[in-house]
Image: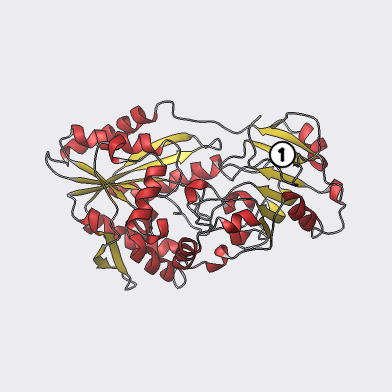
Amino acid sequence: MTFPRIFRVRQKFERTRVADVAAEARRELERLNLRERVRPGQTVAITAGSRGIANIHLIIKAVVDFFKELGAPPFIVAAMGSHGGGTSEGQRRILTDFGITEDFCGCPIRSSMETVILDHTPEGIPVHFAGDASGADHVFVVNRVKPHTRLVGELQSGLMKMMLIGLGKHAGAHVYHRAFADFSFDQIVRSAAQRVIEKGRVLGGLGIVENAHDETALLCAVLPREMEEQEKQLLALARRWLPRLPFDHADILIVDEIGKEISGCGMDTNVVGRKFQMHQAAPEESPKIKRIIVRGLTEQTHGNATGLGYAEFCLTRAVEAMDRRSTWINVTTSGYPAVGMIPPHYDTDREVLEVALGTIGLVEPPRARLLWIRNTLDVVEAECSEAFLEAARQRSDLEVLGEPRPLPFDAAGNLPKTLRHG
């Protein structure tokens, strides 16, 4: 088979960013006048989740340091639903991967999976709350705000969801995701989060928004009464700054790696165009990708292959790296077991591409529209097939970095393990 030739592009995204995240976090916290509400000696539980948020260890440490200066002993709570295999050790390991350790942050980390029932929502749903956090005098919520990979509405991933899924631990995540099958996410997140705010002693939150370069773009501290409205505004910014592929239509998308720290679904469905349907974009959705090939899992996902089911094909090494137990716990708890299904897999890149190119219709392989990215957080530079070259040269938001060249297969028929920036 004659494969399409490729060339590299660099995308030009809006690049609002925070230069000193620790200093900015402190400024935002000072703005809330928390000294009026926190007395010396009172304990503060600070949430830390399972996403690979830029600078999260620095942000968490800045929050810890702030409360220490108030004389309020802080501790960190692993707030991540069923991730880490739904175990205390697994969730602590995830935080360690992010640099969130007791030594670095200077405070204890607690990761028990035990919960207490704070209340019941009007729909009759028990409101689970991390046992570790329930013993604190105050709870401070830290999380990134961005469009969710499956859920829709004015509130998606952010502080409100962290109070449900994160602080609800495995038990809470399980019952809430069951509820999403009968009620809208908007309804459940509002009713349950309000109970957490009222009865969980929530002091406030720090919302994080990132830009398309996977950098901290904005930090915003909020009081509980402001949380819902402020999060709507942060979500609008996050949607505007979301990374995107360089073209809206492609026959094949090669993704080097998927992982839970990259996205809750391994790869961000908002980026690849599969938020509403498993294997094709919805009519109103873009981009529209015919076939996705996943080449591997990140080290930080620890075998959790959630999201593999979105791909039509993958490499066998991705399947061999899969920890079935942690994957299946995660996908069944979330209520989307299909995202953990295993697609046809092949030993080499040459073989999987030959098969995939034979399934895209009548277009001949050299003319196929192919895109190649490292992961859905890292799309500033991408490889594109020659079919895109003329359009790329006419775009002011794209910089063509070289002339078309053959796909760089090695003697075994494999591409470089991950796409590196030039």
x, y (%) of residue 28?
32, 33
* Near-viewer residue (145 or 58): 58
Q: Using residue 67 as the reference point, say whether residue 256 is left or right of it.
A: right
x, y (%) of residue 399?
71, 29
Residue 137 in sight here: yes
Residue for point 32% across, 58% down: 193
Which amino acid type is shown beneath numbered disc 1?
A: Glu
The C terminus sits in image quarter: top right
Residue for point 83% across, 46% down: 3
* Near-viewer residue (165 or 383): 383
Tally of numbered tags: 1
* Near-viewer residue (179 or 112): 112
* Near-viewer residue (244 or 253): 253
Q: Using residue 27 as the reference point, say whether residue 55 is left or right of it.
A: right
Residue at the disc numbered 1: 383
x, y (%) of residue 403?
80, 30
Q: Using residue 349 as the reference point, say whether residue 148 is left or right of it.
A: left
